[in-house]
Image (spheres, rainbow, N blue to C red):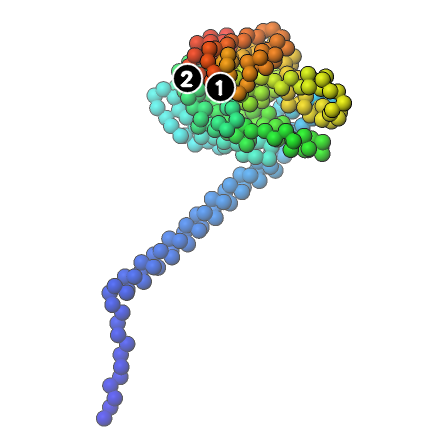
Amino acid sequence: MAKKRKTKPEPSQSKKEARRRQADVNKKAAKAKILIALGLAVIFIALLWAVFGNNATPQEWDVDEDGIMSYPTDRGIPVYDSIIAENNPEYFLDYINYSSRDAVISALLRIPNSSHPVPGILILPGATVSKEGGQGLSAELADMGYASMVIDQRNLGGVDFKLDGNLFQAGQEPTQHKMVFDALKAVDVMRQYPGIDPGNIAIIGISNGGRFAIIAAAIDPSISGVVGISTSGYDIESFIANDPGQVTEDQTRFLRSIDPDTYLDMLLPRKLVMLHMINDSIVPVDLAQATYNKAGEPKVFYTVEGSGHGYNDAMREMLEAELGLMLG
């Protein structure tokens, strides 16, 4: 009697569906890995370009015996990309990444709609404040008729004096110096935009950003002027004079190189504008007044009642008036 051959049971419809779904999941996972890899590759290429891709650009860095930092006035054509983040009848907002020394710096550029190029203002926020955090002031400047770009500073504007001092003594470029160069490259980017008047760009710096703003404006004489809000120098000369044997020659050069007070004479004949809360909670108004007293004319110092830190609405009228004179 012939034996009946056993047949393998067909998989149920639910099992087939489960296998099909698993196959789809595997395909999607593979695609996701490819996209992630491509994204990382793009970022890696951008960083390589930032470090090596602009070899023709003069990027010499130097600090002379008096502690004056210098970078070339001709910094070459800036390398950057931009994406429209917002476009409306009043203004357009671009998200920007630009290369600067060994980094890629992100920024937001707001330009009011106009039939002709408008003056531009670089905004350097205070420590811990991002480019997004500076959009309130940027919007006010657009209402006044100015384009403005807010950048994400390295370390979000924070500084490490000990680390930078060690780098300087080792003959390496300190981060605080690179932050000044980042500001200069940001101005270069702004000059490439057809909606901005390339010969009419100023800098506003807030708190720590104000210190970098003063130094950057001093180094580049083509910058129209500088506004320091809730900021001051470090009064390094008083520190050195009180105990001249406390720091070495190299340390003295480094400390002078990061002190805005060192560069005040280089701002002339451009104007220094300072705005400060009388009871500033972070930078004492007396320290700001000391920096102002060291500066030459033209200059102006406005104090505002209150104990806050940074820009506020009480400063708007003064700021608008001074920008009108500086960039008019």
| Residue 37 horizontal side relative to residue 168, left or right | left
Q: Closer to the camera, 127 or 198?
A: 127
Q: Closer to the camera, 72 or 193?
A: 72
Classify mark 2: residues with Cα within 10 Å, few (<14), some (14-19) or many (20+): some
| Residue 282 horizontal side relative to residue 12, left or right | right
Classify mark 1: residues with Cα within 10 Å, few (<14), some (14-19) or many (20+): many
Spot the residue most to the bottom. 1
Residue 29 in sight:
yes
Residue sitting at x 75%, y 26%:
248
Q: Amino acid at mark 2?
A: Glu
Please identify the quadrant where the N terminus is shown. Answer: bottom left
Residue sitting at x 61%, y 13%:
291
Q: Earlier in the sequence, mark 2 or mark 1?
A: 2
Spot the residue most to the top. 297
Q: Position of residue 152 (x, y in %)?
A: 50, 29
Q: Position of residue 92 (x, y in %)?
A: 40, 24
Give the SS element for disc 1: loop
Q: What residue is pinned by disc 2?
A: 140
Q: What mark, if any, has residue 309 been given in the picture?
A: 1
